[in-house]
Image (cartoon, coloured by chain):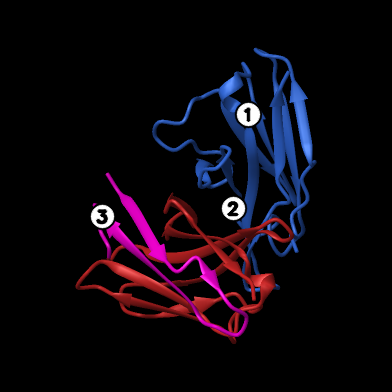
Chain colours: A red, B blue
Amino acid sequence: QVQLQQWGAGLLKPSETLSLTCAVYGGSFSGYDWNWIRQSPGKGLEWIGEINHSGSSNYSPSLKSRATISVDTSKNQFSLKLSSVTAADTAVYYCARLNGGTRDFDHWGQGTLVTVSS
Amino acid sequence: QSVLTQPPSVSEAPRQRVTISCSGGTSNIGNHAVNWYQQLPGKAPKLLIYYNDLLPSGVSDRFSASKSGTSASLAISGLQSGDEADYYCVAWDDSLNDYVFGTGTKVTVL
């Protein structure tokens, strides 16, 4: 049974850096790509980026300049940092596993609400 | 901003059938597989359909989907109160180099 459990700070001030971590329990860690997706009322669901076990990452062009995804294979964890946040970054952030063969997000974390407010 | 267009809401009585459309373009649906997700209130999205029309293990066969050209559709038959949720289509977009999500459709069981 694959489970993704995520955590991180839920309240940030403008210009701070968002930091979230996702731990993967069960299943193979090296055989999949690991993603971050966010959901805000104004923009709906939005893909942020992905990383594989080797550390190779890809990002949405809209967030590439501010997002960094890293991986710790010793702990089966991956993390997201998003710099210089503004109110527009307020959203529920999800980690998710991408099945590379069929390119679907087949397992998701529980979600973390991140609010950016002064 | 969502690139894939879905109707904001659909509603039908219990035991009836509803369909949800997802309209895109040649750079996304026209060239890549479509996946569908169900999001129950307050929960994370759940994979409902993958690779256009395949059901993951454990998903009821009351759900079905298809793709034609640059559009896709999801059907729910034998509608139940537990199907009340938001439904999203997703595909990779070659032009944007990004995953694009649908605008989402809220299903209400009358």
Give the quarter of the figure containing the C terminus of chain A.
bottom right
Q: Are marks 2 and 1 on the same chain?
A: yes
* Quadrant of the rendered image containing residue B40: top right
Q: Residue at coordinates 42% horizontally, 57% vertically from top-left?
A: A101
- Indicate the position of residue A42 as horizontal and vertical percent values: 74, 59
- Indicate the position of residue B86 as horizontal and vertical percent values: 65, 39
Which amino acid lies under the numbered mark 2 shown in the image of this protein?
A: Ala
Residue hosting label 3? A25
The answer to whether A35 appears left or right of A43 in the picture is left
- Quote the CA–CA distance across marks 1 and 3: 29 Å
- Give whichever of B56, A39 is nearer the camera: A39
Q: Are marks 1 and 3 in contact (CB under 8 Å)?
A: no
Which amino acid lies under the numbered mark 1 shown in the image of this protein?
A: Glu
Q: Chain of mark 3?
A: A
Residue hosting label 1? B84
Residue hosting label 2? B33
The answer to whether A99 appears left or right of B11 in the picture is left
User: Dot 3 lies on which element?
Assistant: strand
- Give whichever of B95, A42 is nearer the camera: A42
Q: Residue at coordinates 42% horizontally, 54% vertically from top-left?
A: A109
- B74 vs A39: above or below: above
Q: Residue at coordinates 35% horizontally, 55% vertically from top-left?
A: A4
Q: Are marks 2 and 3 in contact (CB under 8 Å)?
A: no
User: Dot 2 lies on which element?
Assistant: loop
